[in-house]
């Protein structure tokens, strides 16, 4: 009997433990943005926490950017395209007697559940994005509903004074509302409100990082050119917003029409002939070391050579590059590499230069490093004047205002190897180049033979031991 | 240089290396045996190898090639030196009583020269372009090494004079911003062969801290630690069997650390 009672107690204990564990599991298995309690009214995210992005009626999915560029946040491009966010939330535990009203509010100050934060007997810090009807709620059962909110409505009121407490539709001007290049954290609240405006049950909140302003432009711009290449250098930004840089070029390499001030500027040029003394081996065939010095005339080949169109200190002009700034935090006067006065953006902003002029894009950047300060554009045409500028890019993919524009034309160069060969050097051709025919043994073979011999001796000695 | 002369030169260098290695079978001793009549005092570990970490200010003699009309190396990179970092591993296969150790060794290194290429025509008032041009050199040496450590072992003077002789060899690569250089249809890659000679003096550091040196031996088996200065001559002129090599050898003073173990 004692054993039977003990067994029942153990079974009962196990049952209690199991119930406790299952309740704990239910509480922790929800999304991180919900706090669901059984038997109470609640609003939770449905399967997908992140909303779908809708532009011009087309569902673009949860993200439109590379994963390294804050894919679930909002940037200037999202805003200006009049993107909408489509949320799917589940409403449960509501009864018809609740007479609740579904409303969606946004804020950059935190909590919208308190009625005062929505302007009821207080100064509102939240603004409404739209509202549903009491008929949306079904007693005792769960229902999933889709709600769509516009990005411009979310970000537009952030600097409005007073903050609107009724729904206001904002336009593209909302995308210029962010005061600095620092990102702003918004929270979108899905609230079930009673007839007095009090929140019922557990609301659902979705955090949203919004960055509508790109970083300030790089300064300290300088450049140099080489054979079919253009180097641009700058002082790396030290702000907290920059995540990388985009480099722009005009005209587009390998195509496009040069800007009005540039052009394929070459001339046909024949260098003067010159004489040189050459020492040649005596070809008598007697095996001696006799040599003879002769004087020969050399006529270098004629070729097209570039004509400089950009004089040192001259201004560079590119309508494509300089017309792209749409948001600017003000201008500041600096001096370009030629010492001339130039104006650049003082703080952040947005550039909208055509992507065709962007160089070497990879994962959203030309260079994905704030500390970078140089970039080399290759594959250019010698003699064509190129305008080049660089913009800083933030972690949300906003492209800031461009730096001052530098311009130059690539031209042929002589590197060490060209100088060596032009001076009569005969080496080269690869690590495996064949040696002269008729010689006793190739140097590589000779070196290899000695090395092989040494290894052989080593191995033989080891075996003896 | 005639063919018989070339063969004699190759055979002399190769023969020296071969003799160094082949003769070791009969004469090799271990460090546990009496050395030069001096009995080791305690259980020192056996010593069979040496390793060097080497640093040198190095300038190759590219422009010494008589077939060159100009000085392409100096006009591109200037007349300064660059840092040559290298390492060497020696097998002290043969111990010669009252003299020292003799054995083969191999060394590898790296040096790089960089500069800015020049425009073919003046560009905005200058000839200096923004394009880099470089010459990378990878020296590889197969040498015989004689270390006269009897001065230290028998006389107690912590100095070890040494000499090296063997074949010098180097792989090299000329490049610019766009990659390996090409000129006149020839790629800027190649190799050069020659001779390698070195004379040096090593200072044994063990007497400075005998406790540390013994601990070094007990824990890692390192018998002797040296700093050294060495005159190094690498004459990569082709040894008469390679026509017109890029002369990336040169004369340099080399400094570094050596460990015998």
Image (cartoon, coloured by chain):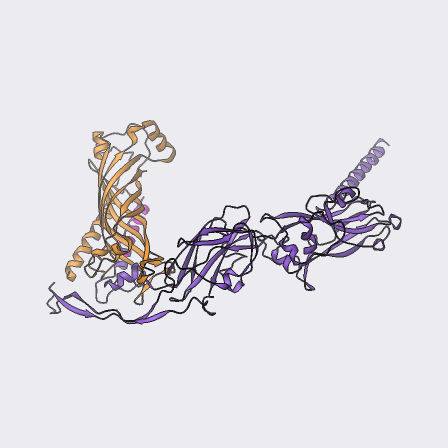
Chain colours: A purple, B orange
Q: Is residue B106 left or right of residue A372?
A: left
How far across and how far down the image is residue B88, in percent? 30, 45
In the image, A16 versus A452, the foreground residue is A16
Query: What residue do we see at 35% from left, 33% from top?
Result: B217
Query: Based on the displayed image, in which of its 4 quarters is residue B75 positioned?
Result: bottom left
Residue B50 in percent (x, y) is at: 30, 41
The residue shown at (48%, 56%) is A390
B163 up-or-down from A432: above or below:
above
Using the rendered view, name the quadrant where residue A397 is placed.
Answer: bottom right
Magenta stretch, residue numbers: A448-465
Image coordinates of residue A394 in percent, x first then y, are 55, 51
Q: Residue furthest right?
A: A97
Residue situated in front as seen by the camera: A452 or A97 = A97
Q: Is residue B106 visible?
A: no
Q: Is residue A458 magenta?
A: yes
Res A302 quadrant in image = bottom left
In depth, the one of A39 and B42 nearer the eye is A39
**Main secondary structure of the magenta stretch:** helix
Q: Is residue A379 a member of the stretch shown in magenta?
A: no
């Amino acid at each position: 009997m004692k054993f039977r009672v003990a067994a029942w107690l153990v079974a009962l204990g196990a049952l209690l433990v199991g119930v406790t564990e299952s309740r704990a599991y239910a509480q922790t298995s929800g999304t991180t943005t919900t706090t669901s309690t059984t038997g109470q009214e609640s609003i939770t995210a449905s399967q997908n926490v992140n909303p779908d992005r809708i532009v011009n009626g087309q569902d673009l999915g949860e993200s439109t950017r590379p994963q390294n560029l804050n894919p679930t946040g909002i940037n200037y491009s999202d805003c200006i395209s009049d993107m909408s966010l489509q949320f799917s939330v589940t409403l449960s535990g509501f009864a018809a007697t609740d007479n609740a009203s579904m409303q969606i509010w946004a804020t950059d100050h935190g909590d919208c559940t308190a009625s005062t934060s929505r302007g009821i007997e207080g100064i509102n810090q939240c603004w409404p994005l739209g509202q549903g009807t009491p008929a949306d709620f079904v007693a005792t059962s769960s229902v999933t509903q889709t709600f769509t909110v516009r990005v411009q409505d979310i970000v537009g009121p952030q600097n409005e004074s007073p903050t609107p407490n009724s729904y206001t539709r904002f336009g593209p001007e909302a995308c210029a509302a962010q005061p600095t290049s620092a990102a702003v954290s918004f929270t979108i609240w899905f609230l079930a409100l009673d007839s007095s405006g009090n929140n019922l049950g557990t609301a659902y909140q979705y955090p949203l990082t919004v960055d509508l302003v790109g970083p300030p432009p790089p300064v300290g711009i300088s450049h140099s050119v080489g054979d079919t290449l253009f180097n641009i250098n700058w002082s790396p930004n030290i702000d907290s917003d920059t995540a990388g840089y985009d480099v722009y070029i005009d005209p587009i390499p390998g195509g496009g029409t040069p800007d009005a001030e540039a052009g394929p500027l070459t001339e046909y040029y024949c260098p003067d002939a010159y004489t040189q003394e050459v020492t040649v081996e005596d070809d008598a065939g007697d095996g001696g070391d006799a040599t003879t010095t002769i004087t020969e005339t050399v006529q270098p080949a004629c070729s097209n050579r570039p004509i400089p169109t950009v004089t040192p200190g001259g201004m560079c002009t590119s309508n494509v590059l300089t017309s792209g700034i749409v948001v600017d935090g003000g201008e500041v006067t600096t001096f370009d590499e030629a010492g001339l006065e130039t104006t650049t953006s003082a703080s952040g902003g947005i550039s909208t230069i055509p992507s065709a002029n962007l160089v070497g894009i990879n994962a959203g950047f030309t260079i994905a490093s704030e500390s970078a300060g140089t970039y080399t554009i290759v594959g250019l045409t010698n003699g064509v004047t190129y305008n080049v500028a660089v913009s800083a890019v933030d972690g949300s993919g906003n492209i800031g205002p461009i730096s001052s524009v530098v311009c130059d034309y690539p031209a042929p160069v002589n590197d060490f190897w060209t100088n060596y060969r032009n001076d009569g050097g005969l080496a080269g051709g690869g690590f495996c180049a064949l040696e002269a025919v008729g010689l006793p043994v190739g140097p590589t073979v000779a070196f290899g033979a000695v090395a092989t011999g040494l290894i052989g001796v080593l191995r033989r000695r080891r075996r003896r031991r | 240089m005639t063919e018989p002369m070339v063969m004699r030169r190759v055979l002399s260098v190769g023969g020296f290396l071969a003799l160094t290695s082949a003769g070791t079978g009969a004469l090799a001793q271990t460090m546990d045996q009496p050395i030069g009549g001096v009995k080791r005092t305690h259980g020192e570990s056996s010593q069979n190898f040496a390793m060097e970490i080497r640093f040198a200010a190095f300038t190759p003699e590219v422009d010494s090639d008589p077939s060159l009309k100009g000085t392409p190396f100096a006009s591109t990179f200037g007349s300064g030196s660059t840092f040559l970092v290298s390492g060497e591993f020696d097998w002290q296969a043969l111990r010669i009583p009252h003299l020292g150790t003799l054995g083969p060794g191999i060394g590898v290194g790296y040096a790089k020269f960089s500069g800015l290429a020049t425009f073919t025509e003046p560009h905005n008032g200058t000839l200096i372009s923004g394009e880099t041009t470089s010459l990378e050199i990878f020296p590889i040496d197969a040498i015989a090494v004689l270390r006269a450590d009897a001065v230290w072992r028998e006389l107690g003077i912590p100095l070890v004079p040494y000499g090296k002789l063997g074949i010098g060899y180097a792989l090299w690569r000329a490049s610019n911003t766009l990659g390996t250089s090409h000129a006149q249809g020839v790629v800027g890659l190649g190799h050069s062969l020659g001779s390698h000679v070195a004379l040096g003096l090593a200072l044994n550091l063990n007497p400075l801290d005998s406790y540390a040196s013994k601990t070094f031996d007990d824990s890692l088996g390192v018998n002797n630690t040296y700093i050294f200065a060495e005159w190094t001559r690498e004459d990569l002129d082709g040894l008469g069997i390679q026509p017109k090599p890029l002369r990336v050898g040169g004369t340099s003073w080399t400094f570094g650390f050596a460990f015998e173990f």
